[in-house]
Amino acid sequence: MAMTDKKSRILYVKRFLDERTDEAHPAGIVEIISFLADEGIAATRKTVAQDIKLLMDADVDIVRNKSRQNQYFIGDRHFEMPELKLLIDAVQASNFLTAKRSNALIGKLLALASPQQAADLVNNLYFEDKVRPKNEKAYLTADCLLTAICLNKRVNFMYYDYSPEKKKLYKHNRKVYEFSPWAFIWNNDSYYAVGYSESHNKAVRFRIDRIASASRTEVDAVPMPRDFDLASFVNSMFYMYDGTMLEITLKCDNSLMTTIVDRFGEDVETEIADPGHFYAKVNVSASKTFFGWVFSMDGGIEIIAPSDALEVYRRMLCRAVKPFAIFVAS
């Protein structure tokens, strides 16, 4: 056999092992010879065994199962089945991706598995009926921002909310923001870009699916300060909402220690208050989102200090609970 034919055969042997084998589905030499024959390539037990040895010598992770008549399978697929399952679930859970984009990305992840593994993963897919975006603009915006980060350039864009009529309401009369993106943050089912805003003259965040008409400039980005702590910035924003930063003392039911640790980390400062409660000192953005979170604990968390935060919380509760009249039938 010519050298080029031998190289071609080795590639087909590797292709077979990549596409058709895994730990649960090894293949014997006879199956490999049959596959090669279907591709018009002649082979014998000896030549296939030699090809497999050459691949193993080249550090291809081929595992030989001696207990099953020298059957072979690919050992390392970069991703294990549980890892692919986690990634696929994350894609499915994303509110950022359109259904079309989500399905395409899941298809690419499935291609990293063997056909048998992919079939098992597909059989375990859970298709949730959830709200998804209907256009690709947010994805294209993310691509623009990511490219700008890689090239260390600024971007220009407009930013919007929604009016009561569900129409786009552009901020500050269609103001064009000049922004130096530093990083992407996933928070509370939404995607944000963190960076330096010329208008705000500080580090801020923008929700990517609320950005419109993004374009990369050729102006160098403002670099992230060396002492900028991205994790602390995210934590201080608390669900990505602005507000005055305060150290707030909370009195919490003992049953909520896990909730406090999940929210503020294991290093959160706590102490015993009484047999049924503990105090927690947290640095947070004193925003409506934070106060809403406290309210959602159904009385299990009380704001103790400072008095300013407690007063803001009280005013919010008064606005939320409107005075009403109770009519009793005569």
Image (cartoon, helix red, strand yellow):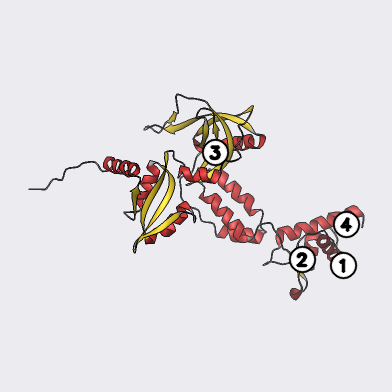
As drawn, is 326 to the left or to the right of 212?
Answer: left
Q: Position of residue 35 (x, y in %)?
A: 77, 61
Which numbered dot is residue 20?
Answer: none
Residue at x-position 71% and y-position 58%: 19
Of marks 3 and 2, which one's residue comes earlier in the chain?
2
Mark count: 4
Q: Point out residue 186 in the picture as x, y percentages from the top left corner.
A: 53, 45
Frontmost of labels 4 and 3 is 3
**Distance in Å between CA atoms under marks 1 and 2:** 14 Å
**Label 4 amino acid?**
Lys
Quick check: marks 2 and 4 in contact, CB under 8 Å?
no
Instruction: Give the amino acid type for the residue marked by disc 1 in the picture.
Output: Lys
Residue 36 relative to residue 248: left or right: right
In-image side of 324 versus 143 (left or right)? left
Q: Which residue is mark 4?
A: 6
The residue under label 3 is 194
SS at mark 2 in the image: helix
| Label located before the other in sequence (4 or 3) | 4
In the image, what residue occupies the spot 39% across and 31% down?
Answer: 163
Between 248 and 81, the residue placed more toward the observer is: 248
What's the mark number on residue 46?
1
Marks 4/3: CA distance? 53 Å
Q: CA distance from mark 3 to mark 1?
A: 59 Å
- Looking at the image, is 325 positioned above or below residue 162? below
Residue 243, image quadrant: top left
Residue 232, can we see it?
A: yes
Q: Say which label, 1 or 2, has the lower sequence index.
A: 2
Name the residue that disc number 2 marks.
31
